[in-house]
Amino acid sequence: MTAFTLRHRTRALVATVAAVAALSLTACEDDELAAGGGTDQSENEAPADQDSGSDGVTEDGGQAEEHEDIDEEGGQGEDGTAGDEVAVIPCADQNTQVTVSPVEQPINHLLLTVTNTGDERCDAHSYPLLGFDDSQAPLPPVEDSAPQAVITLEPGDVAYAGVITSSGDSAEGYVSTSSTLTFMDSYGHAVGDGIELALPGGEVFVGDAAAVTYWQTSTDAALMW
């Protein structure tokens, strides 16, 4: 056998072995795909008509507009309260009854009592505007007596205010035979008409230190000043 023939057979043998190896590798890959080990490209591709973004995002990448149904009756009111809440009306002459009473202690004091005689609850704002016949302006308030919240009266409820008619330190003043009380609204303005009050004994001495407390929920709170 010549050297040329030997080299020719060797090359043919090598080519045959390579071909067999390639066929074996291809068969193994086909077996893995058949057994479910392969990856189907269609599984990774989203359908053309399906949004690729998350909820609330449109196809062009913008944020979807969300709408909420708002009950018109539950909207915000002008006074800052919910629309379905009824605003409390201020106490005034047409929905209250006011009396003035003498007290033994402390001396030089009177007690104002207001009763809600209406069919709805009302707010007794701040303090009563109490004027006497010879006074140029209502009595000033005792600022330290301001409560933490507005006094709200349900129908039939009562509130109180103390009146300091004078102090023992000064004899300056005048004798009054009549007085008028006016309520205030939430803005500090007089509301309604004035209520004429009958003074105990027909008259009272009003000194230069006279003052009135804010509306209170108890007689003790009204007379502690």
Image (tube, grey):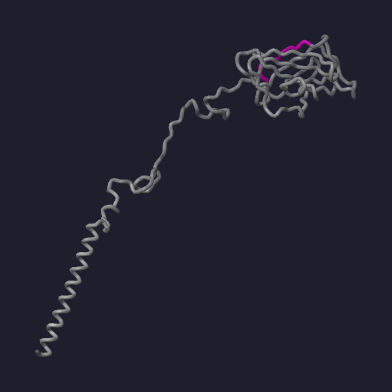
- Give the vertical position of 40 relative to 121 (above or below): below
**Magenta residue check for 184:** no
Q: Position of residue 214 (x, y in %)?
A: 74, 24
Nearer to the camera, 102 or 26 = 26
- Give the vertical position of 113 relative to 22 (above or below): above
Nearer to the camera, 136 or 123 = 123
Q: Residue furthest bottom?
A: 2
Q: Position of residue 24 (x, y in %)?
A: 19, 68
Q: Position of residue 136 (x, y in %)?
A: 79, 20
Q: Which residue lies furthest to the top in this view?
A: 202
Prevailing SS of the magenta stretch: strand
Image quadrant where residue 67 sits: top left
* Residue 17 relative to residue 181: left or right: left
Q: Which residue lies furthest to the left in this view?
A: 1
Image quadrant where residue 93 sits: top right
* Residue 109 relative to residue 31: left or right: right
Quadrant for the C terminus in the image: top right
* Residue 189 relative to residue 163: left or right: left
Total of numbered circles in the picture?
Answer: 0
- Give the vertical position of 169 relative to 6 (above or below): above
x 47%, y 27%: residue: 72
Q: Position of residue 62 (x, y in %)?
A: 39, 46
Nearer to the camera, 183 or 25 = 25
- Magenta range is 189-198
x 57%, y 30%: residue: 80
Quadrant for the N terminus in the image: bottom left
**Magenta residue check for 193:** yes
x 15%, y 79%: residue: 13
